[in-house]
Amino acid sequence: VRWFAEVPHADVLFESASSEIRASEAPKMGEAIEGIRAEIEKFRRAMGQDNAQVDLQLYVGGYTDSLGDAQDNLKLSVARARSIARYFKQQGVDIAILYAGFGERAPLVQTPDNTDEARNRRAVYVIANTPPQGPSFPQARWRRLP
């Protein structure tokens, strides 16, 4: 059985060039964790088993706008995705968590280079039992959180 669900959430706001999750963002993270748990429960109900896992994993993808250097943006998106993944693990999300950064390679909104576009500075949370693929996940190199 293949399962894929993107978890709706409010985006975490980071300071410029930072991957640290500010304390003021905790309510957003808490709501996202509730969404993750709800998606896991939907999967279990669909499988007809309270403990069904079938290799269910959480994938956290990070993205940036096109301001600045593309390599720096890629590194920043990886660091932010890793921070979010660590937060989820610390708060008790009990399935495997993987993360990847995509920098400015998969914008939500197409813009000219060096454009400050808040909608492109985002993260996605996907519950799936196979790695997400497609244009939103270009050349994905998912790393498993220890």
Image: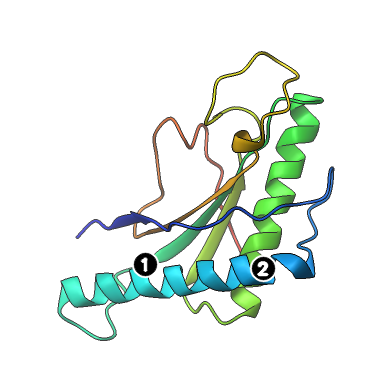
Viewer-nearest of discs 2 and 1: 2
* Nearer-the-camera pick, 86 or 32: 32
Name the amino acid, label 1.
Answer: Leu
Q: Residue at label 2?
A: 86
Question: Image height check: is 89 above or below 81?
Answer: below
Q: Is residue 87 left or right of residue 9?
A: right
- In the figure, residue 85 lies in which quadrant? bottom right
Check disc 2 and report its element: helix, strand or loop: helix
Q: Is residue 53 left or right of residue 90?
A: left
> Can residue 91 be seen in the rendering of this structure?
yes
- In the picture, the disc for residue 56 is 1
* Dot placed on the residue nearer the N-terminal end, 2 or 1: 1
Residue drawn at 24 percent across, 56 percent down: 2
Check disc 1 and report its element: helix, strand or loop: loop
Name the amino acid, label 2.
Answer: Arg
Residue drawn at 52 percent across, 39 percent down: 140
> Can residue 146 be seen in the rendering of this structure?
no
Residue drawn at 29 percent across, 85 percent down: 51
Q: From the image, which quarter does the C terminus lie in?
A: bottom right
Q: Is residue 144 left or right of residue 69?
A: left
Where does the image place residue 129, in percent across and percent down from the top left? Answer: 34, 60
